[in-house]
Amino acid sequence: MTVAFPQSVSVREVGPRDGLQNEDPISTTAKVELIDALSRTGVRRIEAVSFVHPKAIPQMADADDVWSRVRRDPRVRYSALVPNLRGAQRALAAGFTELEVVVSASDTHNRKNINRSTEESLAELPELARLVHDGGGTLQLIVSTAWGCPYEGDVPVERVLWAVGQGVAAGVDSLAFGDTTGMATPTRVTHLVGDTRSAHPAVPLGLHFHNTRGTGLANVYAALQLGVDDFDASVGGLGGCPYAPGASGNIATEELVYMLEDMGIDTGVDLDALLAVAGLAEQLVGRKLDSQVLRAGPRTRTAAS
Amino acid sequence: MTVAFPQSVSVREVGPRDGLQNEDPISTTAKVELIDALSRTGVRRIEAVSFVHPKAIPQMADADDVWSRVRRDPRVRYSALVPNLRGAQRALAAGFTELEVVVSASDTHNRKNINRSTEESLAELPELARLVHDGGGTLQLIVSTAWGCPYEGDVPVERVLWAVGQGVAAGVDSLAFGDTTGMATPTRVTHLVGDTRSAHPAVPLGLHFHNTRGTGLANVYAALQLGVDDFDASVGGLGGCPYAPGASGNIATEELVYMLEDMGIDTGVDLDALLAVAGLAEQLVGRKLDSQVLRAGPRTRTAAS
């Protein structure tokens, strides 16, 4: 069996947004410190903030303030997540040009998350895409609960593909699938990615895995074999899982980078620098994070003999 | 890309041995309780004890006593690990017919572990194999530090293949590779397994991964694609890593079973029963174990909506 892996992978660091959104609130200064430290690791993309209603997610209430204070590195692409038109207007006004809109494939999760049905969220996409494009930006559609919903269980692949089709018709620039509570396994990844590629071969596709059930890097490996070269991860594994106390959330960026670099796949990230930021992240949130590579160090770190 | 996965996988539960060996000592009664509970999960193989010098590994000093009190299930194959001839004699005398001898590919680790060089350990294999076969048993050679050594770092594939070749020449019945401190990544797995298969296509091969750096299940997935259908795992992830305090040890059996069963690969194991035993294991050792599936539950367990 010969498999051609991508030569490089574009890692999007989502710790400052998806990670911190699921931690106890930290200060604006601490958020800026985290983003600035990440900017110096060589990572090429950082999801910096989200523009959501402060009552829904108080952790992101200071998004404008955070962004105005970040020391922006011209080598890094910063993005903002938005749930709707109002959020997109705020993100554009703040100067973001790379926006992501998140819609859950499962109705129950979308209602819990943004208080309307999946269909209602999708119906807004054409206007949202127009707004972002008129503002000189790009819009990614992130379909979350793509491999399962914590309320509904399995989500039919057909439903995910329906949401994707609505986004492509609306003119989004790229797609991503979110494994919101870590329900993906490698064969499920292969199926959904394969079907999406068949339907929309020209649309860039990124994947966002959680390690809630330990399969995060196995899912990445399965996706690499299909040529996927765009993955989200969270420094230190920041975030946890709001549906299962004590369980892991996002795959840890340093675990992703460790595996990819050892496989000869370039990420641009300096692993030692990233591990230092993972240590900083632990200090900022005041708890031990789930990252194994943070605990054990990279394989090149030997014990005193 | 079409990949033929095995239809079923033979899981060897190593929690009572490799797991407990790296925990604070627990009572004989507790060990028997753990093994008996595992016997009722549907798992087909359990590595029950090791016959090592009690000064080297006090956690296994009561191996004879444990084994005499285990309620042996005729559907389960129980095995014992031995470091040398003396251990093999004890294991055979205790009635074991399935023995594993462990030799580290890296000299430093073998010396730390059993106080002699890799070459000295390998030189004993012909006599050891003869002893076991004369006693009506089978002998597996486990080559540990197969993907790296905590003292020496990288271990050349050629050295691992040399150790394997010595074992095959000595007449061992099967082989296993131990990723002692979780230094394997998927491409390294593909290379070593591929080279071993080319050299010894008829010798059964099992793999023993640790999740010390988060790549455990990704390594399993890579090996499945090469047709490997024999994996070790430890209930709850019992064991930890003696070289990195707080880091994970063996891959957790319930994470392995969860992923395999969701991929349609039969293991014979009842996942709910296994999760109950993982909870028991936490109680017996008195600490929170690293298993993600134990924390979050299988993907079929939904939140109250």
Image (tube, coloured by chain):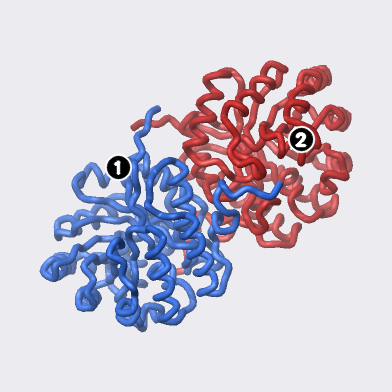
Chain colours: A blue, B red
Q: In this view, does A105 lie to the left or right of A167?
A: right
> Which label lies toward us, 1 or 2?
2
Q: Which of B235 and A140 is in front in this view?
A: A140
Parent chain of label 1: A
Q: Nearer the viewer, residue A287 or A198?
A: A287
How far apart are labels 1 and 2 at the CA level? 44 Å
Q: Can residue B253 be seen in this view?
A: no
Circle 1: residue type: Gly
Q: Is mark 2 on a helix, strand or loop?
A: strand
x and y percent of residue B25 in the render? 81, 54
Residue located beneath label 2 in the image: B81
Task: Where is residue A252? Give x, y as percent.
Answer: 47, 58
A209 sits left or right of B265 in the view: left
On screen, residue A124 above or below B34 = below
Q: Which residue in the protein does label 1 denote? A: A194
Which subunit holds the residue at mark 2?
B
Residue A17 vs B285, above or below: the answer is below
Quarter of the image with the C terminus of chain B is: bottom left
Q: Left or right? Give the position of B262 relative to A66.
A: right
Is B235 left or right of A22, judged from the image as shown?
right
Image: A214 above or below A93: above
Q: Quadrant location of the N terminus of chain B? A: top left
Q: Residue A158's x, y, as percent? A: 28, 50
Quarter assignment of residue B155: top right
Q: Which residue is at 20% across, 47% downward?
A: A200
Name which residue lies at 47% across and 36% down. B187
